[in-house]
Amino acid sequence: MMKERFYGDFMNKGAWWAWAIKNSISVICWGVLAIIFNKWWIALFGLLFMSDFQTKHKSYRICDKCGKHSPYANSYNDALDKAKEAGWIHCVDGNKDYCPDCQKEGI
């Protein structure tokens, strides 16, 4: 349960092995080239070819008065639209966002 919660749905066992093998091959190949040409800095190029896992980015708006965040969305513009649907105010002048609770108290 903890492993599933930590890795989420983006890192199953097959994907993890593919990632590990690809990065191992990169380090080995660039390491061998560094040894053959006797230049240690060649091994640093191996870092350029290593990869990592990326998750889907979730966008949201943050209230500039109290720090609450709006509903999550898949993009910046969708987050703005969802926030407006939920009653948030977006002030273009100064690029400020305010939640419904802060609006009641007075901006």
Image (tube, grey):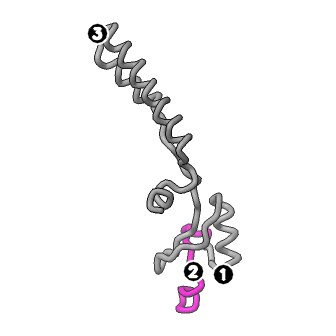
Residue annotated with mark 1: 87
The numbered dot on residue 99 is 2
Question: Closer to us: mark 3 or mark 1?
Answer: 3
Q: Residues within 10 Å of mark 1 (few under 14, many from 20)?
A: some
Q: Residue at x 68, y 63 (%)?
A: 78
| Mark 2 residue element | loop
Amino acid type of the residue tagged 1 in the rendering: Gly
Q: Position of residue 30 (x, y in %)?
A: 40, 19
CA–CA distance in space, label 1 to label 2: 7 Å
Query: Considering only vertical position in the picture, is 55 above or below 48?
Result: below
Q: Is residue 32 magenta?
A: no
Residue 32 quadrant? top left
Give whichever of 9, 77 is nearer the camera.
9
When the figure is inspected, residue 30 is found, relative to residue 9, above or below; the finding is: above
Residue at the (57%, 91%) spot, across then down: 104
Residue that extends furthest to the bottom in the rendered view of this protein:
105
Q: Position of residue 76 (x, y in %)?
A: 63, 60
> In the rendered structure, which disc, 3 or 2, sits on the residue that comes first in sequence?
3
Q: Amino acid at mark 2?
A: Cys
Please state the horizontal and vertical placement of residue 68, each as a whole percent of the image.
50, 77
- Badge 1 vs badge 2, beta-carbon distance below 8 Å: yes
Quadrant of the image occupied by residue 101: bottom right
Q: Which residues are magenta?
A: 91-107
Tell me which corner region of the image, top left, top right, bottom left or bottom right, holds residue 82: bottom right
Inspect the image, locate mark 3, and give the three-letter code of the amino acid beneath it: Asn
Q: Secondary structure at mark 3?
A: loop
Residue 53 in the image: above or below residue 30: below
Q: Position of residue 52 (x, y in %)?
A: 48, 40
For disc 3, the marked residue is 38
Lower sequence index among marks 3 and 1: 3
**Is residue 95 rendered magenta in the image?**
yes
Dot 1 or dot 2, earlier in sequence: 1
